[in-house]
Amino acid sequence: MALPQPVPERTRHPFLTYDMIQEIPDALEATLENTRDEAKRIAAEAEDFDAIMFIGSGTAFFAAQLGSQLLRLAEDPIRYQALEAFEFLHYLRRVPPKTLVVGISHSGVTKATVDALGKAQGRDVLRVGITHFRDRPIAQVVNHLVIAGNGPDRSKCHTKCYVTGALASTVVILELLRVWSGQLPDTVRDVAEQISDLPALARRVLREADRACARWAEAYVDQDHHYYAGAGPNRVTALEAALKIKETSFLPAEGMETEEVGHGSWVSLDPKSLLVLIAPRGASHERSLDLARVAKIVGTPVLGVVSEGDGALAARCDQVIEIPQTDEWLSPFLTILPLYLFAYYSSIGRGVNPDELRYLEPRYWQARQIVFPPGTH
């Protein structure tokens, strides 16, 4: 039986999506406070493990990717992989012994993720679920349940659950690295020392970026195709930002690794498209400068999310928003915030409700019943 079409709780600004974005700093704070003890228990149980797999779907998969990236900094090579839950469920032959499987699902009912965690059984396989609800199906298929955030994401366009799911994963990884190395490795020490600053930094970014993002959305409301480019830890920021433009404004959008833009995709840039460079200081900064120059030549407007004081990139972009300086591996928790606001205000400029995806249109609601039969998401 099809579910009744939703009735929007709000019909004008501020929509629920806006409230959820503004709750992100508090949600980050709650995640740090609530996940450390469980992370220590997980790390103690996985002390002799040598592989980790992260799974999720949609925004939760991007959160899994963001959380997993910290393992690149491990002093000793760690076998890890981030897989979409559907791929894990249907295209992975078996889970090797001594593997920690971490599944992220905001709702705790996402069928592909719950089924994949249920499949991940075997000797010396430890299953961890990261969610925002305690009494959901995901709790029945894991050994450890980690509750992220400060409550559910009330908009169907999920924002705060992305950063809190990723942060919960990061906390778990830091504890694992501490146990595996006997102490916290020097390679992640800056991340561990600065992670508690994220809530305050997030509040500052949201406060300072709000009006600028509203102006961005108004100025570029007629751009009909968006490209987001980020590298290293911000590659996944590009993917998540592109998804949010699709969900809020129903626009074609692509998220790409910075270098990959130069391998063919740049030729589709034109005056009707928009290039957003996610380029805090780091190894990809110079390549971002190149892309900004390319866009200028072909007539594509360029927006930049950059580190404070980055005059070089600001000079080559049409407009920029600065984020406070922090370890590059923590920067994705800040760079995504103005892009969430930009997506939100873009939907307002196009006269659509960002809270409901496109479910207020009968044919899209009908199609949703095929994508997600009742009880599966």
Image (cartoon, grey):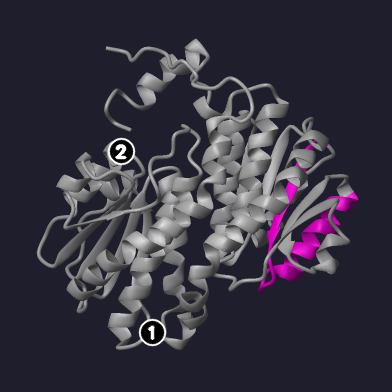
In this rendering, the answer to whether 76 lies above or below 116 is: below
* Residue at the extreme left of the image, as rendered: 123
Residue 345, image quadrant: top right
In this rendering, the answer to whether 32 lies above or below 135 is: below
Horizontal and vertical percent for residue 17?
55, 35
Of the numbered discs in the image, which one, if any, rests on residue 364?
none
Number of callouts? 2
Whether residue 179 appears in magenta in the rendering, the answer is no
Whether residue 273 appears in magenta in the rendering, the answer is yes
Horizontal and vertical percent for residue 188?
47, 80
If the image is split into quadrants, where does the C terminus sit? top left
Amino acid at dot 2: Thr
- Residue 332 visible at all: no
Of the numbered discs in the image, which one, if any, rests on residue 110?
2
Give the Cα separation between the discs numbered 2 and 1: 34 Å
- Which residue corresponds to the image point at 41% horizontal and 49% vertical from the top-left? 61
Q: Secondary structure at mark 1?
A: loop
Q: Are marks 2 and 1 in contact (CB under 8 Å)?
A: no
Left or right side of 134 for 7: right
Nearer to me, 145 or 26: 26
Amino acid at dot 1: Leu
Instruction: Assess disc 1: are there few (<14), some (14-19) or many (≥20) residues with their C-alpha within 10 Å of its C-alpha.
Output: some
- Which residue corresponds to the image point at 61% horizontal and 28% vertical from the top-left? 250
Q: Which circle's residue, 2 or 1, is located before the other in the chain?
A: 2
- Which residue corresponds to the image point at 36% horizontal and 20% vertical from the top-left? 369
- Residue 138 visible at all: yes
Nearest to the eye among marks 2 and 1: give it: 1
If the image is split into quadrants, where does the N terminus sit? top left
Horizontal and vertical percent for residue 143?
16, 58
Q: Secondary structure at mark 2?
A: loop
Q: Which residue is mark 1?
A: 184
Q: Which residues are magenta?
A: 272-297
